[in-house]
Image (tube, helix red, strand yellow):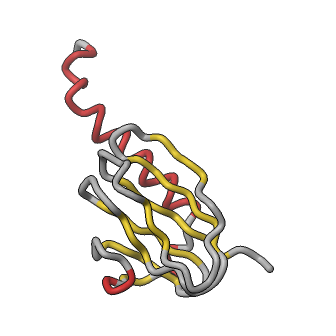
Amino acid sequence: MPRMAFDAFEPARLAMGDTVRYADRARLIEMQPWRDLCLSGYLLASPGVEFLALQPEAGPFTVDARAGHVLVEWFAVNTRTTVQGKDVKPAHPLTRVAAERWPSAVNCQAQAR
């Protein structure tokens, strides 16, 4: 079968690979949905340890990360680029401003103090 026959499946294959990479790093067994901590409502969290959130639409993205210091990693879904974010301190919500023109995800892990 010619390669072009599979080209339509390439975005799905790449998305599954990205999902597996986050699943391998996250402690999913310890996480549960927490709709009230993220404006999009798509958040898995182990409070005080780690969370993984998705903003399926372009635009501002806010997550309540006030549990403590966290290390932040942003992932732009459409471009498949990863950006290390700033250390987030307690009592400050985590916001990614509307400069994003694509869906994005964020992975945060508690920082040892």
Q: The N terminus lies in which quarter of the figure?
A: top left
The quarter of the image holding the C terminus is: bottom right
Q: Nearer the viewer, residue 105 or 91?
A: 91
Residue drawn where x is 61% and y is 81% of the image: 49
Residue 55 at x, y percent in the picture: 32, 62
Q: Image quadrant of residue 54?
A: bottom left
Q: Is residue 103 left or right of residue 109?
A: left
Residue shown at 29% from the left, 36% from the top: 11
Pick the front one: 6 or 105: 105
- Where does residue 5 sit, x and y in percent of width and height? 19, 20
Q: Position of residue 97 (x, y in %)?
A: 40, 58
Q: Residue furthest top?
A: 2
Residue 69 falls left or right of residue 17: right
How many marks do you count on the picture?
Answer: 0
Q: Quadrant of residue 6?
A: top left
Q: With respect to residue 88, does 91 lie above or below?
A: below
Query: For residue 104, which quarter of the picture?
Result: bottom left
Task: Point out the residue furthest to the right here.
Answer: 113
Depth check, front residue: 74 or 99: 99
Residue lying at 45% horizontally and 80% vertically, measured from the top left: 64
Q: Position of residue 50 (x, y in %)?
A: 56, 76
- The residue shown at (52%, 83%) is 46
